[in-house]
Amino acid sequence: MRPLPLLLLLLLLLFSGCDAAAPPADTLFQLPAPRNLKVHLYNAQQALSWEPVSLHNDTRPVVYQVQYKYSTSSTWYDVNKKDSRVDCTNLTGTECNFTANSLLEGFPRHFNISLRVRAKLGDLVSAWVKAPWFEHYRNATIGPPEDIWVTPEEGSLIIRFSSPFDVPASVAFFLYYVYYWEKAGIKQVTRPFRSNFITLNDLKPLRVYCFQVKAELFLAKENISRPGHLSNISCSETTVDASTKLQQVILISMGTFLLLSVVVGACLFLVLKYRGLVKYWFHSPPSIPSQIEEYLKDPAQPILDALDKDSSPKDDAWDSVSVVSFPENKQEDIRQSTLNQSTDPSHQPVEGGP
Ligand SMILES: *[C@@H]1O[C@H](CO)[C@@H](O)[C@H](O)[C@H]1NC(C)=O
Ligand SMILES: *[C@@H]1O[C@H](CO)[C@@H](O)[C@H](O)[C@H]1NC(C)=O
Ligand SMILES: *[C@@H]1O[C@H](CO)[C@@H](O)[C@H](O)[C@H]1NC(C)=O
Ligand SMILES: *[C@@H]1O[C@H](CO)[C@@H](O)[C@H](O)[C@H]1NC(C)=O
Ligand SMILES: *[C@@H]1O[C@H](CO)[C@@H](O)[C@H](O)[C@H]1NC(C)=O
Ligand SMILES: *[C@@H]1O[C@H](CO)[C@@H](O)[C@H](O)[C@H]1NC(C)=O
Ligand SMILES: *[C@@H]1O[C@H](CO)[C@@H](O)[C@H](O)[C@H]1NC(C)=O
């Protein structure tokens, strides 16, 4: 009967021992650790960022502490004014910018760097969280070349730019590529070149060409390269070269001269051919020939007819029209009136008087 309680006691001790062993890991770090660490390496910039730690039952601000270490050493160092010229020991923000101003070089770019961060609140601290190691030249994102200038020339474009960032020639160098194409044409790429300018030759004059520039970083001593991002698309129109310009000028002059000659010749010819007519036109007074005048008067009749319709009786209208329009009728009327006069009895004494 005795061995069973002893066994139970042993088991109890074993389990309670396990329970007792767990707490220290929790109690050591009273704060949650920062999460989602990101190493930001763009051109010459170096920064570390993370997600903020939030506490529900404390209104005091959480601060963060950043440390670094080289792969060659086993000690971690604070990122402070003394070592790094930037202080990230009591940060209230969630970013440590190692190149916060242009004077700061950041960590040596060919060193293998490790970074870690923890949260602090009064005496409480979180566990350290490590970011992946990095070597700037190995890991950095290379931006496009900057300050791109293009000079259009005779059937070519000269493209100048500055490097994405400065690198010591003994350590690393950039090679550049230019992608270019005629509007709606096929993309072409130059051979890699080291200078900060290039002339795109053998382009067609007076055409719009678009291009993008890209840098690639090469390490001098190691077989490492980092391709860069393409610049925004720029477009430029090539100018016309001198000989083509001259040709155009000659062609235009000749064309103008020929056109003028034709016009002048035609005028001369016409003047010579219709010399009589021209003379007549220039010397006769400006009057309309009688036949045309008559023709012009004839179609006017219906209009006069319509005008008179409302105001006066038809017979009168016909009379008045016939009288106004036709000189022959007038003559007839006159003749008729003289006839009437002659046959009029009232006039008879006058007629046959003397
Ligand atoms: C509240 O804060 C205290 C320390 O200030 C901490 O011990 C405790 O775990 C916190 N409670 C919660 C629910 O976060
Ligand atoms: C950089 O250091 C880490 C350890 O700190 C190591 O794992 C890694 O291989 C090193 N990288 C290089 C390129 O040496
Ligand atoms: C940062 O805060 C700690 C306490 O958490 C303090 O001892 C230290 O002096 C502070 N450092 C700076 C630079 O303010
Ligand atoms: C770091 O500071 C520099 C200089 O002010 C700025 O250009 C860069 O954007 C900053 N980097 C980050 C990740 O905020
Ligand atoms: C840097 O690049 C290496 C591989 O070349 C990779 O293992 C490492 O995680 C990178 N570091 C960062 C911070 O991205
Ligand atoms: C350099 O690396 C590339 C791949 O990144 C490889 O194809 C080439 O053979 C390497 N050259 C040398 C000299 O190691
Ligand atoms: C490139 O284009 C993007 C959007 O089109 C713009 O936000 C950016 O400022 C441009 N970059 C340069 C260097 O002009």
Image (tube, rainbow, N blue to C red):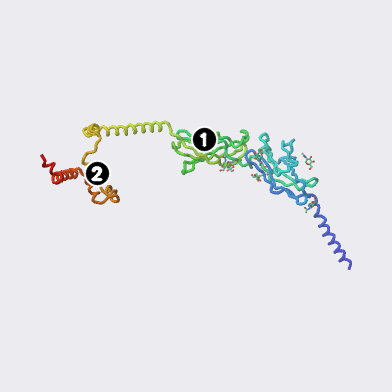
Q: Is residue 312 above or below residue 250?
A: below
Please name whichever residue, 91 or 264, is drawn nearer the observer in this view of the structure: 264
Please name whichever residue, 206 or 270, is drawn nearer the observer in this view of the structure: 270
- Measured as percent of width and height from the top left, residue 260 is found at 32, 32
Answer few, some or many: residues within 10 Å of disc 1's Cα (few below 14, many 20 plus, some between 14 and 19): some
Rendered-image quarter of ligand 4: top right
- Measured as percent of width and height from the top left, residue 166 is found at 62, 34
Q: Which of the labelled discs sits on residue 327, or is there none?
A: none
Q: Which mark is first along the chain, 1 or 2?
A: 1
Which residue is at 74% across, 36% downward? 81
Q: In the figure, residue 107 lies in which quadrant?
A: top right
Which residue is at 39% across, 31% downward? 246
Give the residue at mark 2: 297
Give the residue at mark 1: 150
Kindly report the distance in space between the C-alpha atoms of the residues bearing marks 2 and 1.
Answer: 75 Å
Dot 1 amino acid type: Val
Is residue 337 something one can see in this rendering?
A: yes
- Measured as percent of width and height from the top left, residue 165 is found at 61, 36
Q: In the figure, residue 76 lies in which quadrant?
A: top right
Dot 2 amino acid type: Lys
